[in-house]
Each structure stands twice: as C-alpha cells, then as structure tokens.
Image (cartoon, rainbow, N blue to C red):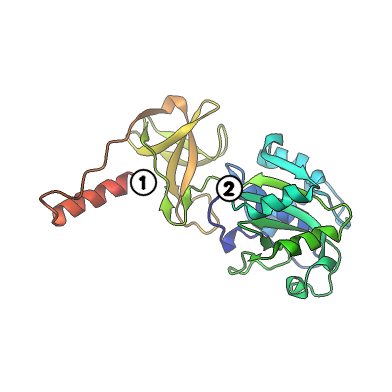
Amino acid sequence: MSDFTAADHVTEREPGSWEDCTFASVLETLRISLPNGRTIPATITEVNRFRAEVPLPDNHSGVTIEQTLPTAKRLYGLKDADYTLTRDWAVLAAALENPNKVCVVTGKMSGVPPGLRRWDTSFMGNHAVAKHGIRVWCDPLAPKDGVYKGEQIALAVWRSFTSALNYWQAMIMEGGDMTLSMGGVTVTSNKLGVIQRATSLLAAPGGERVTTAQPGQKFPYLGSDSGHRMLIVRTGIPYPDKVARDTGLYVINADVSIVDAPPPPSPGGVDTGPAVEAKWEAWVATHP
C-alpha cells in the first residue's frame, strides 16, 4: 500500500461530545483502500456528512460497522467484494500483521494500556480504530495535528482490545488506493498511454474529473477497467496536502492509444559527460 501520512489521519475530535469513532475509522480506511479513496476529504466535516447520511440521531450511542456500509457504498463506491467482515481472531491477526491490509477494528478501551488512552484518559468504553501498516493502531480520538499517524502496538494488545468487547468485529480491506509511489520509488510500466484528444482524467471509471490531459501527452499505462484505461499521472490535485504523487487516473478508451514504451538510453558508453547525463535525466523526467 502507499505511505500513510499525518494528512491521511481522520479524527473524530470536534467541539462537544466525540461520538464518531466508527465513521472516522471507516472513512480513514476507505481513503487508503478504494481506487478513488484519496479524493475523499480526510476531515471532520466529511465525517459528519458520512454520519448524517446513515442516518442516526445526533445523540446516538454508537454505530456498528455494518450500519455504515450501505452509505459507504452510495457515497464512496464501496463494493461487497472490497471488504471482509469477521469476528475470527485468526483472520484478523493475519490481517494485522500484513502491511498490505487495512482494517477497522472494534473493541473496548478498558482492554488497552493507559498509554493508548492518553487522548481521553477516562474513556473505557466501546471504540473503533483503524489499522494500517503492520499492527499500526490509528485512533480517531487522536487529534489531526500534522504529526499523528498512528503507532505500532503488539498483537497481544490488539487481542486484549477486541476480547474486552463480546461482540467485537473487524472490516478488512486491501491497502490499495490510487497512490502508486511507494517509499519514493516510482512505479513504471513498459506501456504508454498516448492521449489522442483533450480529455478528462478521472478518479474512477466514469467518476469525478481530477484533471485534464492534452493530445500527445504520454503516461505509463497499467490496464483497463469498464471502458477506461488506467494511467499513472503525477499530480497533487486529489490530496489534502497537494503534494504531487504518482496517481492512478482513468481515461475513456477512445481518448488514448497504447504503445510500447521506448527503452531508456544507456548512460554508459564512450561519452559519459554532461551531454549524456542531461539526455538520461530528460528521459527519466518524461518516463515516470
């Protein structure tokens, strides 16, 4: 999955009571799993919108993961095939150890050590948290302060958290999203998509426009889906921090042709001076 940053954390903190842990944790997990996930705002405003659409009264005492799913499907394009619901500890434990799985996990805060309760030291009740990476606990009670992005905890603590709640549950998803730059290493392809006419680049097949492309522009090509081609485009537009990332966007089949990517010129040989280095750097810049 892509690198998780502090900008990806979704908090439930707001003036008044904090009651949206499941909505915040589900939202955080959808953002880093769904193909168009990073277009979903990681804000308390979006958490409140999500909650309002379920709907539940403002003074609701809690919500189950299942209660959020019909709305998640309608608002964000979640599909049944995208997730697994489980109460099997062995299944969850494997997902917690897998860096390519993201989860929403429910349990009880009375089952965790005081350090994990530091955001609300008196809270011992039912809670939902998100998991990314390897056993990284990402608590919606933590503030969105530009620093917090979760903390790795022992598997035994995860088990204690779930065991404290008789009806605990987890939702497990693939940690995919459309960010294709992993640890600073850019994903490449041996095929290029060449734009044939001015067109829109979409967050998902038939989905929201993220940006536009002009005739002759070339992008690495990854595959096809529902009458669209998926291209790697370096852009910061869908992200809250506006930092450019390699991003999977879609274009309708008719607006792009697929060709073999030319091999890179060798930087070696007889001439290894500045001219060859410049040629190499130019090629790299135009072939992400």
| Callout 2 touching callout 1 (CB < 8 Å) | no
Residue plotted at (57% across, 36% down): 207
Image location of residue 103, percent across then percent down = 69, 51
Q: Which mark is residue 288?
A: 1
Q: Is residue 283 rendered to the left or right of residue 268?
A: right
Between circles 2 and 1, the one closer to the viewer is: 1
Q: Is residue 240 above or below residue 55?
A: below
- Residue 145 in percent (x, y) is at 62, 69
Callout 1 environment at 10 Å: few (<14), some (14 to 19), or many (20+)? some
Q: In terms of image quadrants, where is residue 216? A: top left
User: What residue is rendered at 80% in x and 62% in y?
Assistant: 161
Label 2: few (<14), some or many (≥20) within 10 Å? some
Left or right: residue 56 compared with residue 228: right
For label 2, the SS is helix
Quadrant in which residue 274 is drawn: bottom left
- The numbered mark at residue 39 is 2
Q: Could you tell me which residue is drawn at 81 percent across and 67 percent down?
A: 16
Residue at left 22%, top 43%?
A: 265
Q: Is residue 249 above or below residue 106?
A: above
Q: How many marks on residues?
A: 2
Residue 104: mark in rendering? none
Type of amino acid at the residue the image marks with label 2: Thr
For residue 288, side relative to residue 178 (left or right) = left
Label 2, label 1: how many angstroms apart (C-alpha)?
A: 22 Å
Q: Given the image, on which type of amino acid does mark 1 rest?
A: Pro
User: In this image, 59 relative to 78: left or right?
Assistant: right
Mark 1 lies on a secondary structure that is loop
Q: Nearer the viewer, residue 200 or 256?
A: 256
